[in-house]
């Protein structure tokens, strides 16, 4: 049997932005639901953070989620197991009050998992592990120690994995309790990654700037082979462009309608041509355009920037190559934190 796994959908994200919900809907209409039909999926496993705000819900966001997601799954006869994540647990020390349980009681096909549970799907036993907190930590690890399940699915915060492609989590829980399982699947971190038996599957779509050019989507899981297959989301929200005296006539701006674009100006010796370039971008219907100009850096210096490098890589390498007595590790950490915060601002 093939089931679908999706995680960190964050309905209501970006303050219930209509722009983002329209973008989410394109994924559900053109990728997610057609794939469920094609594969005759009867079970969806949601590994947490279904809603974005753990303390409240915007009525419009709730209506959107029901109309465009839950009603459709119910009408298709699909069973949904939804695991409580940190964004859906109201308190930080217990999962007892959570958004999915309170908001989705009308759906008989939705089963909320707020504490450790083991279920059997077509003969395969799977351990479901919701968000671990001070109240359930001892009982959860005790249950994992006793478990004979080959598969774990949950919302885990483990050390040593990337929360996004630029930020390695140096804190969190130890992975040791999960070593005995064949495969461990988790939500929480939005970046896809895997190491040994642990697989972070990533969220379905871009939400912040730090998601730029990072693969998104959901997964299919075969209960017989215990193999998972990614279904990628081809749709993007964020674009980074570079201007180097590019002729406006050569710009194909059609894909930037209702998108968020950052234009990095490397060279601008023809102001009128640059204005034409900007006008063409704006005429395409760009939702938000940021232009970054910085001519302070002298490209004739010994430090050269590779086109393939991202901002953090450039800053990190610049520090490494600089002759200074400062604590480079500490400075890198500060820069990473500031960059992380900046990326979450449109």
Image: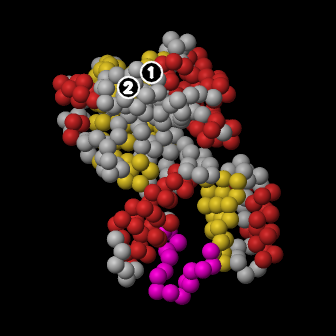
| Main secondary structure along the magenta-highlighted residues | loop
> In this orientation, does residue 230 appear?
yes
Q: Position of residue 220 (x, y in %)?
A: 43, 33
Q: Position of residue 222 (x, y in %)?
A: 37, 30
The residue lying at 81 percent from left, 75 percent from top is: 272
The verdict on residue 322 being magenta is no
How many numbered discs sit on the rendered protein? 2
The residue lying at 30 percent from left, 20 percent from top is: 118
Picture quarter with the N terminus: top left
Res. 129 image quadrant: top left
Q: Nearer the viewer, residue 134 or 295?
A: 134
Few, some or many residues within 10 Å of mark 2 (<14, 14–19, 20+): some
The residue lying at 54 percent from left, 19 percent from top is: 103
Q: Position of residue 86 (x, y in %)?
A: 43, 33
Tell me where the magenta segment starts and ends, as one range.
294-309
Q: Position of residue 318 (x, y in %)?
A: 43, 75
Res. 223 image quadrant: top left
Q: Which mark is residue 94?
A: 2
State the colouring used for the structure image.
secondary structure
Would you say the residues marked 2 and 1 are in contact, meaning their CB atoms lie under 8 Å apart?
yes
Left or right? Give the position of 251 relative to 239.
right
Q: Nearer the viewer, residue 26 or 270?
A: 270
The residue lying at 38 percent from left, 26 percent from top is: 94
Left or right? Give the position of 119 relative to 274.
left
Question: Which residue in the protein does label 1 denote?
Answer: 97
Cα separation between marks 2 and 1: 7 Å
> In this orientation, does residue 43 appear?
no
215 over 125 or under it: above or below: below
């Amino acid at each position: 049997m093939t089931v679908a796994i999706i995680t960190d959908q964050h309905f209501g994200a970006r303050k219930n932005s209509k722009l983002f919900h329209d973008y989410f809907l394109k994924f559900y209409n053109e990728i997610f639901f057609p794939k469920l039909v094609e594969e005759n999926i009867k079970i969806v496993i949601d590994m947490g953070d279904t809603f974005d705000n753990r303390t409240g819900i915007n009525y419009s966001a709730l209506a959107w989620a029901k109309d465009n997601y839950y009603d459709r799954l119910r009408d298709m006869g699909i069973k949904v197991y939804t695991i409580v994540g940190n964004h859906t647990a109201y308190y930080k020390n217990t999962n007892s009050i959570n958004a999915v349980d309170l908001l989705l009681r009308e759906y008989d096909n939705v089963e909320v998992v707020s504490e450790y549970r083991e279920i059997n799907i077509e003969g395969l036993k799977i351990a479901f592990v919701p968000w671990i907190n001070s109240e359930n930590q001892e009982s959860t690890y005790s249950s994992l120690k006793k478990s004979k399940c080959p598969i774990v699915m949950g919302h885990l915060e483990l050390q040593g994995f990337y929360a996004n492609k630029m930020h390695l989590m140096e804190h969190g829980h130890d992975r040791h309790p999960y070593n005995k399982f064949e495969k461990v699947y988790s939500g929480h971190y939005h970046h896809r990654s895997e190491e040994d038996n642990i697989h972070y599957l990533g969220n379905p779509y871009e939400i912040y700037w730090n998601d730029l050019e990072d693969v998104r989507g959901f997964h299919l899981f075969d209960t017989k082979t215990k193999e998972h297959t990614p279904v990628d989301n081809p749709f993007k929200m964020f674009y980074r462009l570079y201007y180097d005296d590019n002729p406006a006539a050569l710009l194909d701006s059609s894909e930037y309608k209702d998108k968020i674009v950052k234009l990095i100006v490397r060279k601008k010796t023809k102001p009128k041509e640059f204005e034409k370039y900007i006008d063409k971008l704006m005429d395409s219907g760009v939702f938000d355009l940021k232009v970054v100009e910085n001519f302070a850096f002298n490209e004739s210096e010994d430090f050269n920037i590779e086109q393939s490098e991202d901002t953090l890589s450039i800053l990190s390498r610049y520090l490494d190559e600089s002759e200074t007595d400062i604590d480079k590790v500490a400075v890198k950490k500060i820069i990473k934190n500031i960059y992380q915060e900046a990326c979450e601002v449109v």
